[in-house]
């Protein structure tokens, strides 16, 4: 039905432009051209230089035929080239596919084929994997080698041109255009593929714009933050921070490898204000030899999005000068879209109550329109009692377009008008959401549901345990029982019986591990524990 506000009030270029994060860099380069945008070893680049190089990349790609919807893959560490790709590729109309540098050649080959990559920018460090992957790809790919001056290891050139020579083909004043439609794809990210082939998650310009600005709001970033790249940029496009930092003309401090000494040096030398990472990054900082640690110039904001850290780790991080904020999200939601938005009065809580608040995933980003825990069958919200479990669901503009070439999986993910995360959780009376498990990680023993996360929380309270993972082990009598894989802290000791007794003091006995295995915990490249590997080990053991 037409209203008076629809008459002669149409969209036009003056009052409507497609949302895209690409303009963030143009604005930063215009307003703060001499501001340091990138630090990488001895290299320093201003925003004017950053923008000119991104335009050169876009121009050179366009000369080689890259246009709307063409895939450009990148096998790169956290380097300036990866930052430039986040702007230059979509400025040419292309779609950036950042490849996980820890994956094997077979999975990389699948991604290159499934995403129909036309160009691949690859770091020399990964040449062995890329060479093996390219041997499995039938279509032609233009390979561009990136020689990072901060890399001194081995690796051969695979392509016809080096990255700097390729950029020299481009025009620093290239007149790029924003997308004709903000729904156009901007990036392609593959899920981990723990069962079957990985799924290609497609992001659009609108979602990238909104999540990037949402990060600024959620992280309370003021002007000119200094951001340390410990989170891999290949992971959900670095949670969209390659675009976020340009909003506030901040400085990217690149880091090829996440090691304690380079992190402390970067924080101290460059005045780092923010960083993101999995709990393994916290462990690296806290467990570093004293000789590698340096005083922090200020309190550093640390954002983590894996399992909530135990209270002992949170306390140690606070003492070390880091303020930890817990985020939650998935590849399908552009990375984190939920935040444990902290209330100042919670600081006064007793340690146990404080830890309970910190363990919650929280509430939606301002950029996410809907977050709910619902019954997956009826789609009705579960009671906000902190006990009734349902599936965590999201909806809004920072949810993916869908899965590339996989309409069945897309339809299943969006059934009922919400994105179904596959995570099980509860809603507390104050509206904060807390995860209880992945639906596939619930252990059903003798008809009773056991949350693996609940058991892991208890195990992490044990003073000798550095890492742990709890999975179901097949059992003739009970169907399945909890099996705990435990990694001890250096120099610490504990027996299986001691660990089981520790759990029995804190949990209902049926929830306690029946088996304890001491082993190195397998983790993903982003520090997440690989439960599927643990399940395989439990079945075989």
Image (cartoon, rainbow, N blue to C red):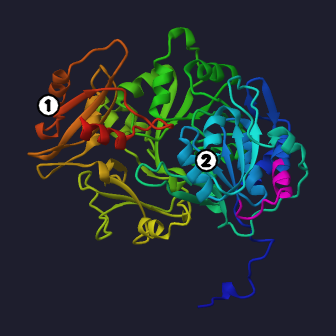
Check disc 1: other Cα within 10 Å, few if <14, some if 14-19, many if 20+: some
62 is within the stretch colored magenta? yes
**Residue 504 has which mark?**
1
On screen, residue 280 versus residue 385, left or right, reads right
Seen as rendered, the residue at the extreme bottom is 1
Residue drawn at point x = 48 percent, y = 67 percent:
410
**Residue 237 has which mark?**
2
Seen as rendered, the residue at the extreme top is 291
Picture coordinates of residue 46 (x, y %)? 82, 36
Picture coordinates of residue 473 (x, y %)? 21, 41
Of callouts 2 and 1, the N-terminal one: 2
Picture coordinates of residue 471 (x, y %)? 27, 41
- What is the magenta range? 57-70
Tell me if residue 14 comes above or below residue 351 in the rendering.
Answer: below
Residue drawn at point x = 43 percent, y = 35 percent:
523
Tell me if residue 188 comes above or below residue 167 in the rendering.
Answer: below
């Amino acid at each position: 039905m037409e209203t008076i506000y629809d008459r002669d009030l149409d969209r036009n270029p003056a009052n409507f432009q497609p949302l895209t994060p690409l303009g963030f860099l143009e604005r930063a380069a215009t307003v703060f051209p001499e501001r340091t945008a990138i630090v990488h070893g001895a290299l320093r680049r201003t925003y004017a230089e950053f923008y000119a190089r991104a335009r050169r990349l876009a121009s050179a790609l366009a000369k080689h035929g890259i246009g709307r919807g063409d895939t450009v893959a990148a096998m790169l560490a956290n380097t300036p080239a990866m930052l430039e790709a986040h702007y230059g590729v979509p400025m040419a109309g292309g779609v950036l596919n950042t490849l996980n540098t820890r994956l094997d050649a077979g999975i990389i080959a699948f991604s290159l084929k499934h995403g129909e990559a036309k160009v691949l920018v690859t770091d020399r460090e990964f040449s062995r994997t890329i060479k093996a992957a390219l041997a499995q790809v039938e279509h032609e790919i233009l390979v561009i080698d990136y020689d990072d001056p901060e890399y001194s290891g081995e690796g051969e050139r695979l392509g016809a041109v080096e990255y700097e020579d390729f950029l020299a083909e481009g025009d620093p004043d290239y007149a790029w255009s924003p997308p004709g439609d903000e729904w156009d794809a901007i990036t392609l990210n593959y899920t981990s593929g723990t069962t079957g082939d990985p799924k290609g998650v497609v992001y659009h310009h609108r979602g990238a714009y909104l999540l990037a600005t949402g990060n600024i709001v959620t992280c309370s970033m003021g002007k000119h933050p200094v951001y340390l790249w410990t989170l891999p940029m290949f992971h959900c496009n670095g949670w969209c921070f390659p675009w976020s930092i340009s909003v506030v003309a901040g400085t990217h401090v690149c880091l090829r490898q996440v090691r304690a000494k380079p992190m402390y040096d970067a924080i101290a030398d460059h005045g780092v204000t923010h960083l993101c990472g999995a709990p393994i990054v916290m462990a690296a900082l806290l467990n570093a030899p004293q000789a590698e640690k340096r005083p922090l110039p200020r309190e550093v904001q640390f954002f983590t999005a894996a399992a909530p850290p135990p209270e002992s780790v949170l306390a140690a991080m606070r003492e070390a000068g880091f303020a930890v904020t817990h985020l939650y999200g998935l590849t399908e939601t552009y990375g984190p879209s939920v935040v444990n938005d902290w209330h100042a009065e919670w600081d006064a809580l007793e340690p146990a109550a404080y830890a309970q608040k910190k363990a919650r995933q929280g509430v939606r980003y301002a950029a996410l329109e809907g977050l709910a825990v619902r019954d997956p069958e009826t789609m009705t919200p579960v009671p906000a009692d902190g006990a009734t479990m349902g599936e965590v669901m999201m909806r809004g503009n920072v949810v993916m377009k869908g899965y590339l070439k996989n309409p069945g999986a897309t339809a299943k993910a969006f059934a009922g008008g919400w994105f179904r995360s596959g995570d099980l959780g509860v809603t507390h009376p104050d509206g904060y959401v807390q995860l209880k498990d992945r639906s596939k990680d619930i252990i059903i023993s003798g008809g009773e549901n056991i949350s693996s996360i609940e058991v892991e929380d208890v195990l992490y309270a044990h003073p000798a345990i550095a890492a742990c993972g709890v999975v179901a082990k097949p059992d003739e009598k009970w169907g399945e029982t909890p099996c705990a894989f435990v990694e001890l802290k250096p120099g610490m000791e504990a027996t299986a019986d001691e660990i089981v007794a520790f759990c029995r003091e804190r949990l209902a006995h049926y929830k306690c591990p029946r088996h304890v295995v001491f082993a190195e915990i397998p983790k993903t490249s982003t520090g997440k524990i690989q439960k599927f590997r643990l399940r395989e080990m439990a079945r075989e053991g």
